[in-house]
Amino acid sequence: MSVWFGNRNRPHIHLTRFRNGKHMRIQTYGMTGTLRMAAWLAICLAGAFPVGLAAADTGKCDSLEPLEWLVGEWQTSAGPVIAVESWTRVAPGTFEGYGEARSAETGKVTNRETLRLVEMSGEVFYIAMVAHNDFPVPFRLTACSGGTFEFENPGHDFPTRIAYRRTPPDRFVVMVSNADGGGFSLDFGRPPVTAPNTALPADATNELADR
Protein backbone atom coordinates (compact mmCIF):
# COMPACT_ATOMS: atom_id res chain seq x y z
CA MET A 1 0.00 0.00 0.00
CA SER A 2 1.29 3.45 -0.91
CA VAL A 3 0.10 6.81 0.43
CA TRP A 4 1.14 10.30 -0.68
CA PHE A 5 1.12 13.14 1.84
CA GLY A 6 0.95 16.47 -0.01
CA ASN A 7 1.07 17.49 -3.66
CA ARG A 8 3.51 15.44 -5.76
CA ASN A 9 4.70 18.65 -7.42
CA ARG A 10 5.60 20.21 -4.05
CA PRO A 11 7.51 18.98 -0.97
CA HIS A 12 5.77 15.79 0.10
CA ILE A 13 6.05 12.36 1.73
CA HIS A 14 5.55 8.96 0.10
CA LEU A 15 4.64 6.26 2.63
CA THR A 16 4.73 2.57 1.62
CA ARG A 17 3.44 -0.24 3.87
CA PHE A 18 4.70 -3.68 2.87
CA ARG A 19 2.45 -6.72 2.75
CA ASN A 20 3.61 -8.14 6.06
CA GLY A 21 2.21 -5.02 7.71
CA LYS A 22 5.23 -4.71 9.99
CA HIS A 23 7.53 -2.51 7.96
CA MET A 24 7.26 0.78 6.18
CA ARG A 25 9.36 2.85 3.83
CA ILE A 26 9.11 6.62 4.17
CA GLN A 27 10.44 8.78 1.34
CA THR A 28 10.53 12.58 1.32
CA TYR A 29 10.85 14.87 -1.65
CA GLY A 30 11.91 18.52 -1.67
CA MET A 31 12.14 18.79 2.13
CA THR A 32 14.84 20.30 4.30
CA GLY A 33 16.23 18.27 7.20
CA THR A 34 14.12 20.10 9.81
CA LEU A 35 10.90 19.79 7.82
CA ARG A 36 11.64 16.14 7.05
CA MET A 37 12.06 15.30 10.76
CA ALA A 38 8.89 17.19 11.72
CA ALA A 39 6.88 15.39 9.05
CA TRP A 40 8.33 12.03 10.03
CA LEU A 41 7.43 12.54 13.68
CA ALA A 42 3.94 13.67 12.70
CA ILE A 43 3.43 10.32 10.98
CA CYS A 44 4.59 8.49 14.12
CA LEU A 45 2.21 10.46 16.31
CA ALA A 46 -0.68 9.90 13.89
CA GLY A 47 -0.21 6.14 14.23
CA ALA A 48 0.87 5.50 10.63
CA PHE A 49 4.25 4.18 11.73
CA PRO A 50 3.96 0.80 13.48
CA VAL A 51 5.51 1.74 16.80
CA GLY A 52 2.74 -0.09 18.66
CA LEU A 53 3.35 1.35 22.10
CA ALA A 54 1.01 2.64 24.75
CA ALA A 55 1.36 6.32 25.52
CA ALA A 56 3.63 7.34 28.33
CA ASP A 57 2.17 8.27 31.70
CA THR A 58 1.36 11.92 30.98
CA GLY A 59 1.36 12.69 34.67
CA LYS A 60 5.04 11.83 34.99
CA CYS A 61 6.67 11.25 31.62
CA ASP A 62 5.38 14.09 29.47
CA SER A 63 8.27 16.56 29.76
CA LEU A 64 12.06 16.79 29.73
CA GLU A 65 12.23 18.37 33.17
CA PRO A 66 13.07 15.07 34.95
CA LEU A 67 15.98 14.65 32.49
CA GLU A 68 17.65 18.01 33.19
CA TRP A 69 20.47 16.19 34.96
CA LEU A 70 21.50 14.69 31.59
CA VAL A 71 22.66 18.06 30.20
CA GLY A 72 26.44 18.32 29.80
CA GLU A 73 29.22 15.95 28.74
CA TRP A 74 29.65 12.37 29.86
CA GLN A 75 32.35 9.79 29.20
CA THR A 76 33.12 6.13 29.68
CA SER A 77 36.07 3.96 28.75
CA ALA A 78 36.41 0.45 27.38
CA GLY A 79 40.02 -0.52 26.70
CA PRO A 80 41.26 1.44 23.67
CA VAL A 81 37.91 3.24 23.19
CA ILE A 82 36.42 6.27 24.92
CA ALA A 83 32.68 6.77 24.45
CA VAL A 84 31.33 10.31 24.83
CA GLU A 85 27.73 11.48 25.13
CA SER A 86 26.86 15.17 25.31
CA TRP A 87 23.53 16.99 25.70
CA THR A 88 22.48 20.66 25.43
CA ARG A 89 19.07 22.22 26.09
CA VAL A 90 18.32 24.28 22.98
CA ALA A 91 14.65 25.04 23.72
CA PRO A 92 12.16 24.40 26.55
CA GLY A 93 11.04 21.16 24.89
CA THR A 94 14.20 20.11 23.05
CA PHE A 95 17.60 18.69 23.98
CA GLU A 96 20.19 18.18 21.25
CA GLY A 97 23.09 15.82 21.71
CA TYR A 98 25.59 13.47 20.15
CA GLY A 99 27.34 10.22 20.91
CA GLU A 100 30.91 9.52 19.85
CA ALA A 101 33.41 6.69 20.03
CA ARG A 102 37.01 7.94 20.14
CA SER A 103 40.39 6.29 20.16
CA ALA A 104 41.86 6.55 23.65
CA GLU A 105 45.34 6.76 22.10
CA THR A 106 44.83 9.34 19.35
CA GLY A 107 41.49 10.98 20.17
CA LYS A 108 40.27 10.25 16.63
CA VAL A 109 36.48 9.91 16.29
CA THR A 110 35.62 6.48 14.89
CA ASN A 111 31.81 6.59 15.18
CA ARG A 112 29.31 9.39 15.70
CA GLU A 113 25.55 9.71 16.01
CA THR A 114 23.26 12.71 16.38
CA LEU A 115 20.72 12.56 19.20
CA ARG A 116 17.65 14.56 20.16
CA LEU A 117 15.11 14.52 22.98
CA VAL A 118 11.84 16.28 22.18
CA GLU A 119 8.46 16.90 23.75
CA MET A 120 5.61 16.44 21.28
CA SER A 121 1.86 16.19 21.87
CA GLY A 122 2.23 15.33 25.53
CA GLU A 123 4.90 12.69 24.98
CA VAL A 124 8.70 12.52 24.92
CA PHE A 125 10.76 11.02 22.12
CA TYR A 126 14.41 10.01 21.95
CA ILE A 127 15.58 10.37 18.33
CA ALA A 128 18.81 8.91 16.97
CA MET A 129 20.30 9.65 13.55
CA VAL A 130 23.13 7.42 12.34
CA ALA A 131 24.95 7.43 9.02
CA HIS A 132 23.49 4.18 7.65
CA ASN A 133 19.83 5.20 8.23
CA ASP A 134 18.07 7.54 5.81
CA PHE A 135 15.72 8.75 8.53
CA PRO A 136 15.96 9.40 12.28
CA VAL A 137 14.85 6.50 14.49
CA PRO A 138 12.41 7.52 17.25
CA PHE A 139 12.00 5.81 20.61
CA ARG A 140 8.96 6.73 22.71
CA LEU A 141 9.37 7.31 26.45
CA THR A 142 7.19 4.59 27.95
CA ALA A 143 8.26 4.51 31.60
CA CYS A 144 10.00 6.83 34.04
CA SER A 145 10.35 6.07 37.72
CA GLY A 146 13.09 5.71 40.29
CA GLY A 147 15.59 7.55 38.13
CA THR A 148 15.12 5.16 35.17
CA PHE A 149 13.83 6.36 31.79
CA GLU A 150 12.83 3.73 29.22
CA PHE A 151 12.45 4.52 25.50
CA GLU A 152 11.04 1.88 23.15
CA ASN A 153 10.46 1.20 19.45
CA PRO A 154 9.58 -2.48 18.93
CA GLY A 155 9.45 -1.97 15.16
CA HIS A 156 13.17 -1.19 14.95
CA ASP A 157 15.69 -3.96 14.22
CA PHE A 158 18.27 -3.13 16.93
CA PRO A 159 17.79 -1.87 19.49
CA THR A 160 14.13 -1.89 20.44
CA ARG A 161 14.78 -0.42 23.89
CA ILE A 162 17.12 2.25 25.26
CA ALA A 163 17.03 2.88 29.00
CA TYR A 164 18.86 5.53 31.03
CA ARG A 165 19.28 4.88 34.75
CA ARG A 166 20.64 7.70 36.89
CA THR A 167 23.08 6.65 39.59
CA PRO A 168 23.79 9.70 41.79
CA PRO A 169 25.73 11.68 42.54
CA ASP A 170 27.00 12.08 38.97
CA ARG A 171 26.72 8.94 36.86
CA PHE A 172 24.25 7.08 34.68
CA VAL A 173 24.00 3.70 32.98
CA VAL A 174 22.55 3.39 29.47
CA MET A 175 21.17 -0.03 28.59
CA VAL A 176 20.73 -0.83 24.89
CA SER A 177 18.76 -4.01 24.20
CA ASN A 178 16.23 -6.04 22.23
CA ALA A 179 13.08 -7.79 23.41
CA ASP A 180 15.04 -11.05 23.76
CA GLY A 181 17.38 -9.42 26.28
CA GLY A 182 20.41 -9.22 23.99
CA GLY A 183 22.41 -6.00 24.09
CA PHE A 184 24.94 -4.13 26.18
CA SER A 185 25.26 -1.42 28.83
CA LEU A 186 27.57 1.54 29.34
CA ASP A 187 28.39 3.24 32.65
CA PHE A 188 28.93 6.99 32.10
CA GLY A 189 30.34 9.63 34.42
CA ARG A 190 31.55 13.19 34.17
CA PRO A 191 34.99 13.38 32.48
CA PRO A 192 37.59 12.20 33.14
CA VAL A 193 36.32 8.64 33.69
CA THR A 194 38.57 5.66 34.34
CA ALA A 195 36.12 2.97 35.48
CA PRO A 196 35.87 0.07 33.00
CA ASN A 197 32.61 -1.30 31.59
CA THR A 198 32.44 -4.93 32.62
CA ALA A 199 29.21 -5.50 30.65
CA LEU A 200 30.58 -4.07 27.40
CA PRO A 201 31.17 -6.68 24.66
CA ALA A 202 34.10 -6.44 22.27
CA ASP A 203 31.97 -5.10 19.40
CA ALA A 204 29.91 -2.67 21.48
CA THR A 205 31.50 0.34 19.78
CA ASN A 206 29.76 -0.58 16.53
CA GLU A 207 26.52 -1.45 18.35
CA LEU A 208 26.56 1.91 20.12
CA ALA A 209 26.82 3.70 16.77
CA ASP A 210 23.92 1.63 15.41
CA ARG A 211 21.42 2.48 18.11
Image (cartoon, rainbow, N blue to C red):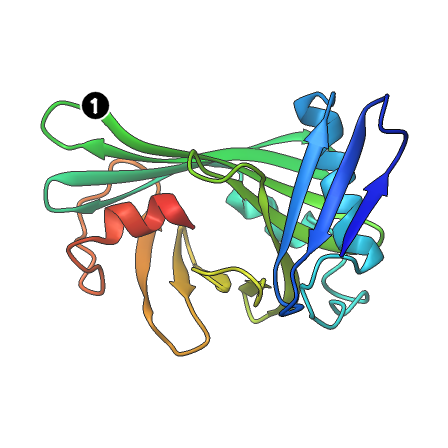
Above or below 5: residue 32: above
User: Residue 14: percent from the left, percent from the top?
Assistant: 75, 40
Q: How many marks?
A: 1
Residue 47 found in image quarter? bottom right
User: Residue 196: percent from the left, percent from the top?
Assistant: 17, 54
User: At numbered mark 1, what does the secondary structure look like: helix, strand or loop?
Assistant: loop
Which residue lies most toward the bottom here?
A: 180
User: Residue 134: percent from the left, percent from the top?
Assistant: 54, 36
Circle 1: residue type = Lys
Q: Quadrant of the N terminus?
A: bottom right
Residue 99 seen in this snapshot: yes
Which residue lies most toward the right here?
A: 7
- Residue placed at 33% from the left, 72% from the top? 182
- Nearest to the observer: residue 26 or residue 117: 26
- Nearest to the observer: residue 144 or residue 153: 153
User: Residue 147: percent from the left, percent from the top?
Assistant: 54, 65
Q: Is residue 115 left or right of residue 209?
A: right
Task: Characterize the local packing of mark 1: few (<14), some (14-19) or many (20 or more) Cα atoms within 10 angstroms.
Answer: few
- Residue placed at 77% from the left, 36% from the top? 13
Residue 141 found in image quarter? bottom right
- Residue placed at 43% from the left, 58% from the top? 168
Q: Is residue 76 left or right of residue 3?
A: left
Residue 73 seen in this snapshot: no
**Residue underneath mark 1:** 108
Above or below 13: residue 109: above
